[in-house]
Amino acid sequence: MDFVRDEKKKVAVAASFGHDRDFRSNRERIIASEYFKRFDAISVREESAVGIMKRVFGVDATRVLDPVFSTDRQVYDDIAAESTRNETEPYMLTYILDPTPEKKEVIRHLSEKLGLRTIHILDGTPWNYESNKEKLGMDTILENVTFQDWVYYFKNSSYVLTDSCHGMSFAIIYHKPFAGIGNAHRGMTRFASLTKLFHVEDRFVTNPLDIIKNDHFLEPMDYTQVEEIMEKEKVFFQDWLKNAMFSEKTVKTYQAYPAKIETTEAVDIHVKINEPIQVKQTFLRRVYYHLPVKVQNKVKPIVKNYFKKKAQQ
């Protein structure tokens, strides 16, 4: 949002790094830090992201609930009602983004132990759907799944197996017994943060085969505590968002606005700026760090000489 003027309010809601560290180069971090500091409020989904924002970018952030939990479940029910799918028998839903032989083995195990037929949803991106379908190599893999269908199958499932963080989220929203498999490729931190928040770590593994070894995954789940936590988190999230959106804006620019003065006498208004070249320095530094490194090295002496002369004036 570098194109937004500083007198406009900028709020980031439930952003996510996906991982427990930042992968930018030092040069990119300097640029990102400047942009982050222009935001009025930033919230993130993981506790680890709060530390990254403070430690790496020098910015305060607040951990809030993933937005999928912030709305009433009836909203998703209405979406599911728009689906044209119709399942009449109980089933186990698998939402697998990255199929492996181990996950395939777990699917067969749970299906047999639970006595449920299986319905499979894969990563819907067109460039890897066919390859994922071949890797899973099982019947009843759904095609042309709309978002309405996606929600419908979560709502009406009897059990959920997934390696997706949002797959786990919707299993929780619909109070389904589930088994979650960590997906390092897509960011393990989100899984850990989600399961820790709702105290469902016992339904989560990093090695798929651990599900086969533990009959606990065959048991139903008590969602009483989860609902209590969710309601408190919803209130906190809504309060944070309301304050971020409607609190008074603090303008940190030198832009002046006309003021109405209730007096008939002539009044001289003086604006004192302690660092008159700070705006230009900040702007030039931002431009400088956007240049390729080779170009930076070439113009560095010119930039240093320019500010040296300015400081002497």
Image (spheres, rainbow, N blue to C red):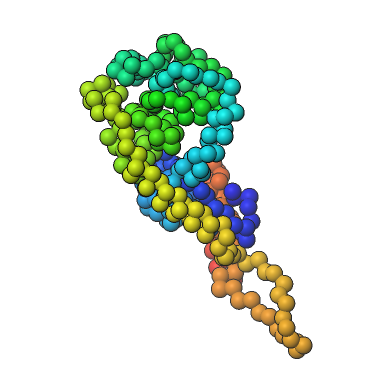
- Quadrant position of residue 18: top left
Answer above or below: position of 79 versus 123.
below
Residue 139 visible, this angle? yes
Q: Residue at x 32, y 37 (%)?
A: 222
Answer above or below: position of 19 versus 242.
above
Query: Residue 17's spot in the image, x, y percent?
Result: 43, 41
Name the side, left or right, on which 303 lies relative to 92: right
Observer-nearest of 176 and 14: 176
Q: Residue at x 77, y 88 (%)?
A: 264
Answer above or below: position of 259 versus 176.
below
Q: Residue at x 54, y 30 (%)?
A: 80
Residue 189 visible, this angle? no
Identity of the residue furthest to the bottom in this view: 265
Name the side, left or right, on which 39 lies relative to 57: right
Query: Residue 50's spot in the image, x, y percent?
Result: 39, 50
Observer-nearest of 189 and 24: 189
Query: Residue 207's spot in the image, x, y percent?
Result: 28, 26
Query: Residue 42's spot in the image, x, y percent?
Result: 49, 52
Q: If the image is split into quadrants, where does the C terminus sit?
A: bottom right
Name the side, left or right, on which 210 lies relative to 74: left
Q: Residue at x 25, y 28 (%)?
A: 216
All told, the count of numbered labels is 0
Identity of the residue furthest to the right in this view: 264
Observer-nearest of 66 and 281: 66
Identity of the residue furthest to the front in this view: 88
